[in-house]
Amino acid sequence: MSEALAAELGRIVGPRWVRARPAELTVYEADGLPTHASRPALAVLPGTRQELIEVIRLLHLASVPFVARGAGTGLSGGALAGNDAVLVVLTRLNRILRLDPERRRAVVEPGVVNARLSEAALPHGLHYAPDPSSQSACTLGGNVAENAGGPHCLKYGVTTNHVAALEILLPNADLVRIGSSSGDAWGPDLVGLFVGSEGMFGIATEITLRLEPLPAAVRTLLAAFPSIRAASEAVSAIIAGGIVPAAMEMMDQACVRAVEASIYAAGYPVEAAAVLLVELDGTAEAVAAEAGEVDALLRSHQATEIRTASTAAERAKLWQGRKKAFGAMGRISPDLAVQDAVVPRSALPDILDRVAAIAAHYRLAVANVFHAGDGNLHPNISFDGRDPGMVARVRAANHDIMHACLAVGGSITGEHGVGSDKLAYMPDAFDADTLGAMRAVRHAFDPGARANPGKVIPYHACREWRRGGTV
Amino acid sequence: MSHDVLDRLRNLLGAAAVSRDPDGVPRAVPDSTDAVAATLRLAEASAWRVRLEGHGSWVPADAPADLALTTRGLDRLVTVQPADLVATVEAGVSMDVLQRRLAAEGMWLAIDFPGRPERTVGSVVATATGGALRAGFGPVRDHILGCTAVTGDGRVVRPGGTVVKNVAGYDLTKLQVGGFGAFGVLTTLHLRLRALPTADVTLVARAPRDHLTSAARDLADAGVQPQALELLSPAVAADSDWILAARCLGSEGGVAGDIARILDVADLAWSRLDADGAHAFWHLVTHAGSGAGMTIRLGVLAPGLDELLDLVGQHLDEGLIWAGASQGGMRWAGDATADALRTLRRLAAEREVPLTLERAPWPLRQVVGHFGAYREGVGPLVAQLREIFDPGGRLVVAMDEADA
């Protein structure tokens, strides 16, 4: 890529906010998934919305592809740019523009870190509900691009349920406002369409988010089970009982032991085959009553031990192991592939048996942590990226896991996105006409296919669209 | 012309699947996604204008067309999975049939749509018409996991899936929910269900409107969030004054706790309805506007309700009004002129409140559109999306004023 372009970008954002030397670009070669790497031609870090608009306009006029990136915590190789593309890093656009407690709305720039919004809302008795495990680092713009989830999405919904309106910058540098503070729109649901489009429709420059009142009471229960099947049946019984916990998270024994061997040790029972965390929130009266019902259900489904935490400190301790599970597993081997797939909740025990068999077949160590309430599993495969044979086995195991999930009616991703990592599985998940429609919709937003090129939609597998969508 | 249409349709679908509507317009009643696709391919090749219908009880089946395509032949419950709380149903299934079947297996679809009980699932989804329970269970879009839709030129697309969490591919389903059929014909829907609550309690209070909105604010400030907290005009509740209705659903203990908090926080003379009384009350409230000629919804947040209610009273009337006192949203039903609607739409837009025309006779839909005028930059995007999903412009839908 030309030095002239770097100089032009430098004139917009200031030379120190353009990265062009290989050593400077190394940090941008990967996201949170170590199985994919790609070095961008340049990285540019605009400091204001206006600078961002001018950067995108320049790239449009020069017909240069670009990839928007937040904190780089994604887990699908989604924010990687090739050597023909400019990485547009949005972390300097980190202002909370408005916080309106009465209307329970916040307007933020895309680089605001997820957890920072909840901290800002706390004095008003409010919080932002979606809580990806990376919430202390990941950005809200990235959350919008990926339609991020998190443990508490069981009750409160994922990112798309919390975005009311967006200002989006199209790849041709046009600005469009979609949605409204209420969530209703002057037109079809373009906000719903944009959220989860993985940076391929444009960049969200202003994000209007719903804030939720902090619950008056929260109680967390930890239960140990002799088998994953027993724990899964307990989860189904709780939901069938009409109780919607704020979160229901499960860890298998390998995961629990990794946590307990780390600095994040939370006192989890290491002999249990499965540990289940159930969090209830609401009014004090409702939480007390439902905690009793949940406790009884857990015991009737073979829970061997139940601990209850009501104070913030006690709850933080129980949650610490779950929230830091990925970090704890990272100690076991040089690299960790955090996978993501979804199955019908009733299929969880069988699919975890299958994951274990696949891991054994490929001689890999796998530990499972998952959102049990909604069937979203995260098999985590430990490996050494310096060993090409092992990397190939990890890829083969991932392939088998994805197909096992699809075979029971599941999805190849519940919250991490398709990115580069799941691109090959899209034709297994969708037919050629549906992929063709997706490609055509992308074309409506980005006719030049310059925004995050090469992700999500495998063009070779798309049936040609008659009008509008042919590229 | 219509004889030709009839003959060609009969050849395609069989004589039993083709009839005429009361105005003589040929009507196709395909019974599968493939048959819908074949019908629309024929319509595309023949350059027919196509009107979409469910049971015709919500949006009037009166758009000018060469062919009426109804989904009422798509009436199968494909799969119901109690263990996973999901179901796949065809779009022409009646909501009352669906809810009865689900209830028999301890589940329900948590949408209390306005209109007649036999409205089709496809109608509720295509028009995105939720009721008071949207406060606790979310708008219609939150209940739809995926769909099968047939484009105006007869292609079949299947976005989303059947699991409750899924980010694979672009979320094209969102376009279909509330798209009024402009992006294709919904033929199958994947639904997210809930377990039937073990407790379901309704409290009602009668008072002047401003007392009720003030009490609702007290509840919000205290963080009390019933699954429905609906402000109802006297005409809706068949009462002498405005009514605030709070409905809590869930486990016995959870609901008892929430009810205790409402009684403690909101200083109103609440009455607790017994089970039969609550059922009759919500039936009355939900179906109160069925006889009205048109329905609009306004995307207003709760703090703006009082001002919007005044505006609606000033420019339309204070007849049939339902308003979300905690999460916002307002629905009005009655009769109004195009000029009155345009004026209200403009005044609402100045307050950042979108007005959607949910249903009205075709002459009104045609001139004001479901959405009116788009904001800058949105119109070209919507036009391109419509071209993708209906390249020949076969589907007669008055989305915006440009369709007039």
Image (cartoon, rainbow, N blue to C red):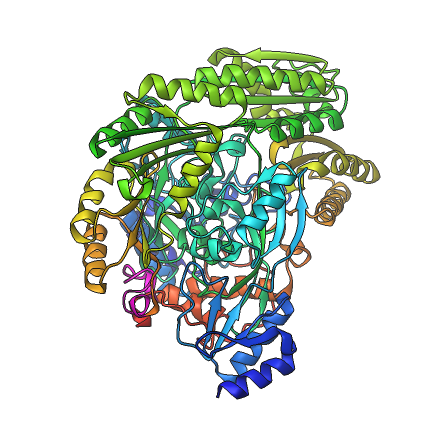
Hey, which quadrant is residue A187 in on the image? bottom left
Front position in the image: A209 or B266: B266
* Residue B388 rendering spot, x and y as whole percentages: 48, 69
* Residue depicted at 47% across the width and 48% down the height: B141
Residue projecting furthest to the right? A361
* Residue A77 rendering spot, x and y as whole percentages: 57, 47
Hey, which quadrant is residue A269 in on the image? top right
* Residue depicted at 30% across the width and 70% down the height: B363
Compared to residue A177, the image places residue B64 above or below, namely below
Compared to residue A313, the image places residue B272 above or below, namely below
* Residue B318 rendering spot, x and y as whole percentages: 22, 46
Relative to B12, A168 lies left or right? left
Compared to residue B168, the image places residue A444 above or below, namely below
Residue B282 visible in image: yes
Hey, which quadrant is residue A54 in on the image? bottom left
* Residue depicted at 63% across the width and 24% down the height: A328
Instruction: Tell me how many marks there are.
Output: 0
Relative to B84, B57 lies left or right? left
Residue B365 among magenta residues: yes
Residue B133 visible in image: no
Q: Which residues are magenta?
A: B363-379
* Residue B235 rendering spot, x and y as whole percentages: 28, 44
Front position in the image: B244 or A346: B244
Residue A36 among magenta residues: no
Front position in the image: A160 or B73: B73
